[in-house]
Image (cartoon, grey):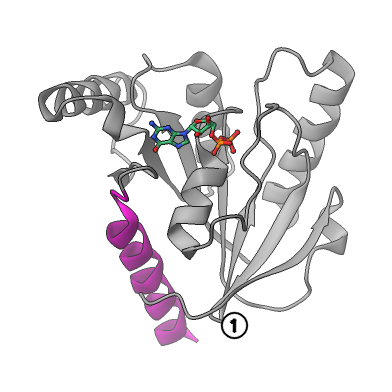
């Protein structure tokens, strides 16, 4: 997919104030500092569409970006950052779950995980929540440039083995690096294919 336009539309913490347009929507979520803003900037070919955060836990809003005037990319708040107070954590968890439960335009989520790390409880629990809520999702392994090809393979394989302990089937997954522009074409192709399937059904 060629990215012709990428425009910021609105930020808010209330799902009822998200855009009313009935366009397919893809949400990006993961632990703070996982590389979500960098990935969004890489996907959209923008240096600064999503703010790369020096201070994790800062961007606690639902951010809508309109891509090619025909689908929304949604940047959701990072979860699981220890320095966010318990109350703030609860609040953004609530509006994240509100978003997932109410947003009928949502087609699929992308859960970002740092390829270097062992499977983290909070990510596995979040995927379980998506599964129970019947929300399709893919995994994006980030920062692949930090590992050698063999190690990438091994980490992905280990992650899949962990998932297969509780999941009957693996979700689609992508390996990415924003610094080396890895994974961009595959992720955008996946979105384009999914959009085409939706249009065919309409
Ligand atoms: P966010 O908090 O999830 O939005 O993460 P950011 O995109 O702000 O990135 C967090 C940190 O990881 C920053 O220091 C980025 O420069 C770094 N980072 C993000 N993506 C990559 C990547 O693909 N490779 C490497 N080596 N570093 C990355």
* Number of numbered discs: 1
Residue at 79 percent across and 23 percent down: it is 89
Q: Quadrant of residue 71?
A: bottom right
Q: Whole-percent x and y of residue 55?
A: 70, 27
Q: Is residue 184 magenta?
A: yes
Residue situated in front as seen by the camera: 186 or 38: 38
Residue at 29 percent across and 33 percent down: it is 144
The answer to whether residue 103 is above or below residue 29 is below
Q: Quadrant of residue 187?
A: bottom left
Residue hosting label 1: 69
Q: Whole-percent x and y of residue 116?
A: 34, 20
Q: Is residue 169 left or right of residue 106?
A: left
Q: Secondary structure at mark 1?
A: loop
Note whether residue 104 is visible.
no
The answer to whether residue 80 is above or below residue 11 is above
Note whether residue 91 is visible.
yes
Write the start and end of the magenta stretch as one range: 181-202
Q: Is residue 202 left or right of residue 119?
A: right
Residue at 38 percent across and 35 percent down: it is 142
- Secondary structure predominantly adopted by residues drawn in magenta: helix
Q: Whole-percent x and y of residue 37?
A: 57, 45
The answer to whether residue 80 is above or below residue 111 is above
Residue situated in front as seen by the camera: 52 or 139: 52
Q: Is residue 131 magenta?
A: no
């Amino acid at each position: 997919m060629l990215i012709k336009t990428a425009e910021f539309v609105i930020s808010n913490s209330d799902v009822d104030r998200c855009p009313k347009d009935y366009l397919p929507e893809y949400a990006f979520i993961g632990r703070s500092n996982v590389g979500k803003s960098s990935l969004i900037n890489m996907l959209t070919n923008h240096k600064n569409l999503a703010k790369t955060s020096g201070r994790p836990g800062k961007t606690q809003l639902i951010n809508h970006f309109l891509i090619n005037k025909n689908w929304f990319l949604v940047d959701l708040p990072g979860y699981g950052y220890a320095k966010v107070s318990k109350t703030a954590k609860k609040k953004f968890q609530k509006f994240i779950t509100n978003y997932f439960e109410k947003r009928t335009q949502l087609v699929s989520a992308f859960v970002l995980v740092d390829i270097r790390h062992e499977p983290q409880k909070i990510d596995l629990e979040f995927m379980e929540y998506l599964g129970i809520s019947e929300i399709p999702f893919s995994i994006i392994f980030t920062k692949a440039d930090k590992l050698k090809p063999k190690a990438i393979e091994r980490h992905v394989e280990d992650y899949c083995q962990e998932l297969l302990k509780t999941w009957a089937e693996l979700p689609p997954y992508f390996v990415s690096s924003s610094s080396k522009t890895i994974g961009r074409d595959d992720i955008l192709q996946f979105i384009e294919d999914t959009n085409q399937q939706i249009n065919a059904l309409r």
